[in-house]
Image (cartoon, helix red, strand yellow):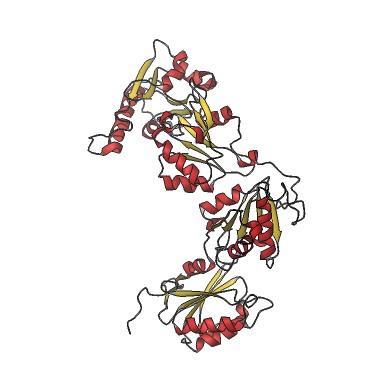
Amino acid sequence: MSVPEQQSGARTPGRLYGVGLGPGDPSLMTVRAVQVIAEADVVAYHSARHGRSIARAIAAGHLRADHIEEALVYPVTTESTDHPGGYRGALDDFYEEAAARLAAHLDAGRTVAVISEGDPLFYGSYQHMHKRLAHRYPTEVVPGVTSINAAAARLGRPLVEADEVLTVLPGTLPEEELTARLAATDSAVVMKLGRTFPAVRRAMERSGRLPEARYVERATMAGERTGALEDVDPASVPYFSVAVVPSRVAERDVPGDVSGARGEAAHAPGDVPGDAPGTVSGDVVVVGTGPAGPLWLTPESRGALAAADDLVGYTTYLDRVPVRPGQLRHGSDNKVESERAELALDLARRGRRVAVVSGGDPGVFAMATAVLEVAAEERYRAVPVRVLPGVTAANAAAAKAGAPLGHDYAVLSLSDRLKPWEVIAERLRAAAAADLVLALYNPGSRSRTWQVGKARDLLLEHRSPDTPVVLGRDVGGPEESVRTVRLADLDPAEVDMRTILLIGSSQTRTVRRTDGTATVWTPRRYPEG
């Protein structure tokens, strides 16, 4: 509420009200909205050039003959304009003129109620008056039931439950942006359909949300229509309609008891809920979660994790994924990739939507290959498998250090668990001889302590002792540490499985910034000769 100071003897200004009328049914107006309209001297409402106002129609039963009505008629809606400032300039001029008209009433001491359907500050026209007048006059905003709430009520479907996130989107966003946001959220409402409907429908389909999406037109008003979004004729969609993706928790059947603080499956990892194999086909999506927590997730990966019936993965990576009621989580040790893949594919054969959770990018020394190897077996050939990329540990550490991967580079794993050390050494020599920057994964562990020293000594046969080496540990996590040392000073004791090594080429540079930090970068150009 804003109350300006008054000079002695000056006329007391009138009071400005922004009045929400609800979604359309006059009986859904609040008691306060009815009171304010009854006490107002002036009732203002917006309309298109045809002069019909939905807000006025809702409030018609409460208007008196002695009310002063101010119809604020938009000069343009969606059509083009020859205004020098274009569409935005035409609207800005209109809002200034409309505010001046209302200010004249307020200066004369009249109470002005600007009525709007829904809530005044939720995509409402009133907000443009509020921004121009509320700091000058006593003001009160009367909230109203939004079209979102009305749509959910008419569908009889919960919007959000537990820790779900609701995203509200204008249909006027670019289609790519709509797709990304729909993929990433739990529940969604898309406003302002009409001519945007074809793009909204495509975004729903591309994000995998179309089967869940519902359509609501003119909720609580005459001509109300609801149904599945995919069945709606685009030519029949008016502006006053919304697309709703309801709560996934409410829709998901909870198979059996789910116990434990992390939502672990109550049954043993080998027990698979659902029908017998081959009766219904689900799918498997291998999801890269990046090097750490939610900030590194892509929208597509976030959406796939939320949509899954079952999460399968190394327990450390599963712990990064928020717990959702109804999902089953199948955690296991880090060295049972094939068994984990087989479990995921068996779940999918029973009609389950399965997300295999992988750190970093699933195709870089991670779970994608393990799943695809098992999926190549004849019994799993019919199971759909998708791989979603993630931010790699190499890219994450490189970004923290600067741009050491700015030119050609090679990626190798120092683990000799799945290939002999002789192969690793041969590839190190070849990459070093080619003067490639190196990203070294899996450099050491409790049971592997000598590989880093061997790799360092081998590389020193081809590289200067001053070659910069970036040690990125737990990048993005609570114990993040990114340091740069000379190749000759690389100490194996400072390296573990949570560390990635980025070894510079002959061209890689280290620059000390004025704040004391070091930036490592490899030029994009390589010297001739």
Q: Nearer the viewer, residue 140 or 268?
A: 268
Q: Is residue 200 above or below residue 306?
A: above
Q: Position of residue 146 (x, y in %)?
A: 51, 30
Q: Position of residue 483 (x, y in %)?
A: 52, 74
Decide if residue 132 is in sight here.
yes
Left or right of 347, for residue 461: left
Decide if residue 12 is in sight here.
no
User: How many marks do you count on the picture?
Assistant: 0
Left or right of 272, for residue 36: left
Q: Is residue 112 above or below residue 502?
A: above
Q: Nearer the viewer, residue 19 or 373?
A: 373
For the C terminus, which image quadrant? bottom left
Q: Nearer the viewer, residue 328 or 7?
A: 328
Q: Where on the picture, by quarter, is residue 155?
A: top right
Q: Where on the picture, by quarter, is residue 70?
A: top left
Q: Nearer the viewer, residue 128 or 396?
A: 396
Left or right of 90, for residue 138: right
Q: Where on the picture, by quarter, is residue 471?
A: bottom right
Q: Position of residue 89 (x, y in %)?
A: 28, 37
Q: Position of residue 185 (x, y in %)?
A: 54, 46
Q: Is residue 298 above or below residue 393?
A: above
Left or right of 417, for residue 237: left
